[in-house]
Amino acid sequence: MASIIIIAVVFVLDVLAFVLAIGAERRRSYVTYVNVDTYGRAYCVYSSDASTAYGVSALLLLLAGQAVAMVATRCFCCGRALSPGRWRAWSGICFVVCCITFVIAELCLLAGSVRNAYHTKYIPRPSDSPPSCAMLRKGVFAAGAAFTFLTALFTELHYLFYARSRAAADSPPPIVGGIGMTRM
C-alpha cells in the first residue's frame, strides 16, 4: 500500500519547485538601459536578480522531492524483488522517464540560474555603439518548469506502481484447485 505521507511530501515539494520555476521565468533580469560612468565607460544596468534565487530554490526543492521518492522506492533496484507483472513493468517505465525528465529539469533550472546571474558590467573596448548586454533567453525557466511538472507526474506514478508491485509481492500465491494432492 502506498504511503499517503510519501505521496504528499513529494507532491508538495514538486509543486513548490514548479511554482518557483514559473516565478523565475516571470522575474528574469532585463536590461533597463546602458549607462556611462564617470570615466566614460558604458555599462549595462539590469533589473531585479530574483529569478536566480527562484531558480536555485526550484532546483533544490525538485532535488529534495526526487530524493524522498528514491529513498522510499529504494532507487527501484535495491531491496526485495518486486512481483513480476504489469505493476513492476509500469513502475520501471515510469522510473526511467522520471529520471530523464528530472535530469533535463535540473539542467534547465541550473543553466537558467547561472546565465541569469551572469551580468556584463563593463565593456573593455571603447566604441560608439552601446555594449551588448548578456541576458537569459526567454523560455529557459519555462522549460525547466515544464520538465519539473513531468518529473512530478512520473515520480508519483512510479511510486504508486512500485507500491502496488510491492504489495503484490507480499501476498502469498493463490491456491488453485482447493486441496493439494501428493504422489504416493
Image (cartoon, rainbow, N blue to C red):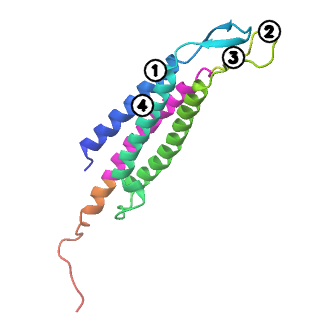
Q: Which residues are magenta?
A: 136-163
Measuring from the top left, give residue 72's x and y in whole percent.
33, 51
Give the distance between the C-alpha atoms of the residues marked 2 and 1, in whole angstroms: 33 Å
Q: Are marks 3 and 1 in contact (CB under 8 Å)?
A: no
Instruction: Note whether 60 is above or below 38 in the view shown.
Output: below
Q: Earlier in the sequence, mark 2 or mark 4?
A: 4
Q: Is 154 placed above or below 143 here?
A: below
Task: Give the residue at x 55% y 34%.
Answer: 110
Instruction: Mark 3 or mark 1: name the one nearer the start of the chain.
Output: 1
- The residue under label 3 is 133
Residue depicted at 50% across the width and 17% down the height? 26
* Residue toward you, 142 or 1: 142
Picture quarter containing residue 88?
A: bottom left
Which kind of residue does numbered mark 3 sit on?
Cys
Q: Label 4, on which residue?
A: 17
Question: Of helix, strand and loop, which one carries label 1?
Answer: helix
In the foreground, 36 or 158: 36
Tell me the distance, in whole angstroms, between the alpha carbons under discs 3 and 4: 29 Å
Q: Which residue is mark 1?
A: 23
Res 129 label: 2
- Pick out the residue farthest to the bottom: 184
Left or right: where does residue 29 sit relative to residue 76? right
Question: x, y percentage for residue 73?
Answer: 36, 53
